[in-house]
Amino acid sequence: CERLLLDLLLEGLRQLAHEDWVVFKLTLPTQPDLYLPLMQHPCTLRVLALSGGYAREEACKLLAQNTGMIASFSRAFTEGMLVTQSEEDFTKTLDESCEAIFQASRSPGRKEMQLAKVRQQEGFFAALDQSGGSTRQALRRYGVDDKAYTGEAEMMDRMHEMRSRIITNPKFDGSRVVAAILFEATMDREIGGMPSAKFIWEMKRVVPILKIDQGLAEEKDGVQLMKDMPALDDLLDRGVAAGIFGTKERSVIKHFNQEGIKAIVQQQFDIARRVLAKGLVPVLEPEVDIQASDKEACERLLLDLLLEGLRQLAHEDWVVFKLTLPTQPDLYLPLMQHPCTLRVLALSGGYARE
């Protein structure tokens, strides 16, 4: 019932006009955080929880498992209040009820809400981080000819116009889009008169992720590592100041080579630790080329090495993986089940959308 209800409520929200604000009051769901997509829609002011017959202690326990929901309890609120109580006892019971429900309803901070969204919400990450050589190709696919701009700066301006058009469209919002991966030039620009990352989170409820790698090195041992990033700490500091949640860093496996794949994974986790030290969540992207003749063998070794890297992380060092769709279905289930993994994303890798 609740899953169908969620789908229908989201469909109703998509038919509302901009600034048609609503509040939902819903039964505490069986699946914690089920209603996160409702909270992330720009027309939703708040999602309230009704106690629905649960005793107050149980209702508060369930409410605390649902990030961002707040109570609108009736029976659970008045539980224990009696006409026969003295004023002192009545006041004590009321105070205890208010405090218990208040504590269970406390709104999470930005980071906590974003963590819950990345970990739990159904949806997808929009990869809007075309840069370098891929920017020109992306603009051509969009219908912008090379003659429409002169030089790198104007090219990035045209790219930002495309990204802004996507992000400001009413159909792009946090009810379906979990996060957006942005290029540095997008972070440094504004959307709707606001810094881009701020707009994306506050107006769209989409988690902002920053691409931090500076491109790929030449192929060696069957792989392309990330180029050196001498200004990484400065970029991460700027990302933190801009309200970025996490980072994305890409390298590529071209052929099966144990030493090369080990180097890829080592570099990914080395960068991830620097990102974690800044309070950000890294998205590790060791892509396997879909044209690799030994793609499946690459993926099996990659899985083993990624699991080994995860075992070396500290508790609550959360990471996200962005990986090529594997030849063997469900190959990456062990990654998803590790407590340090927030999410495993699939990259299209050259496949058409269908």
Image (spheres, helix red, strand yellow):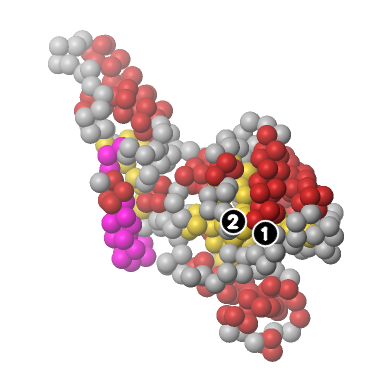
Which amino acid lies under the numbered mark 1 shown in the image of this protein? Lys
Q: Which residue is mark 1?
A: 295
Q: Which residue is mark 2?
A: 326
In terms of image quadrants, where is residue 220?
A: bottom right
Which amino acid lies under the numbered mark 2 shown in the image of this protein? Pro
Report the front residue among 206 and 339: 339
Question: Counting other residues with Cα less than 10 Å from the Cα at mark 2, is it few (<14), some (14-19), or many (20 or more)?
Answer: some
Q: Is-magenta flag for residue 180? A: no
- The tag earlier along the polypeptide, 2 or 1, is 1
The structure residue drawn at horizontal position 23% and vertical position 34%, both measured from the top left corner, is 52
Looking at the image, residue 88 lies above or below residue 166: above
Q: Is residue 282 left or right of residue 256?
A: left
**What x and y, as percent, mark residue 345?**
56, 53
State how many labels appear.
Answer: 2
Q: Which residues are magenta?
A: 6-28
Looking at the image, residue 145 lies above or below residue 43: below
The structure residue drawn at horizontal position 78% and vertical position 59%, both measured from the top left corner, is 223
Report the front residue among 234 and 277: 277
**What x and y, as percent, mark residue 77?**
26, 27
The structure residue drawn at horizontal position 70% and vertical position 59%, both measured from the top left corner, is 294
- Which residue is situated farthest in the bottom direction here? 147
Looking at the image, residue 339 lies above or below residue 169: above
Secondary structure of residue under mark 2: loop
**What x and y, as percent, mark residue 29?**
32, 39
Q: Is-magenta flag for residue 25? A: yes
Looking at the image, residue 167 lies above or below residue 112: below
Q: Is residue 337 left or right of residue 79?
A: right
